[in-house]
Amino acid sequence: MSKLTLALEGDTDVVVKRRFAAKPEAVYRAHTEPRLIQKWMLGPPGWTMPVCISEAEPGGRIRFEWSDGNGNGFHATGEYIALEPFSRIEHIERMFLPDPTPDNHVETRFEADGDGTLMIMRMMLPDSDTRAAMLSTGMDQGMEESYARMEELMQSGQIAA
């Protein structure tokens, strides 16, 4: 059962929430440090992320490249707008599938929740058609597979605060 919830707000926003059994420091670091991102943000089994650039500072670049090892792949680029260590990340991202998608403005908050963290991610798309196209990809399933992998790494001590 997925721990991720997804809600639509207005015509353009998607709000994703998920709780992690780890401190906000660990969840924030897992979202910003390249060597950690490459361990969990992989989507379906069998995919890898051979290129991971995450310059976690305002104006810093983001580039993630995924590969299935059989010549298939895609990538995303973006840039960080603002970061408040352990509590908030704001960035722009665009996927190349292979054509670039319109910019997705993303704000992710990490709130202490008992002995864990409540992550609240708001994706702000430019229009309702872009939002519908993004949701039709099944992105929520890929996100949950990646988040479940992150949580396993946290529980095994491979990602710690």
Image: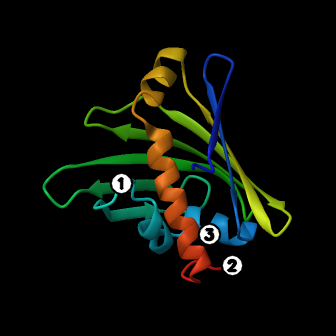
Question: How much space separates mark 1 and mark 3, taking CA atoms?
Answer: 22 Å
Q: Is the C-beta separation of discs 3 and 2 under 8 Å?
A: yes
* Left/right of residue 105 with respect to residue 47 in the rendered view: right
> In percent of the image, x 62 and y 69: which residue is there?
29
Tag 1 residue: 44
Q: How is the image coloured?
A: rainbow
Q: Locate residue 148, reporting x and y percent.
A: 53, 61
Q: Nearer the viewer, mark 1 or mark 3?
A: 1
Q: Secondary structure at mark 3?
A: helix
Q: Is the C-beta separation of discs 1 and 3 under 8 Å?
A: no
Q: Which mark is residue 29?
A: 3
Q: Which mark is residue 52?
A: none
> In percent of the image, x 42 and y 62: which residue is there?
53
Question: How much space separates mark 2 and mark 1, taking CA atoms?
Answer: 26 Å
Q: Earlier in the sequence, mark 2 or mark 1?
A: 1
Q: Nearer the viewer, residue 75 or 3?
A: 3
Name the amino acid type tagged 1: Pro
Name the amino acid type tagged 3: Arg
Determine crowd level at label 3: few under 14, some 14-19, many 20+ residues with C-alpha closer than 10 A: some
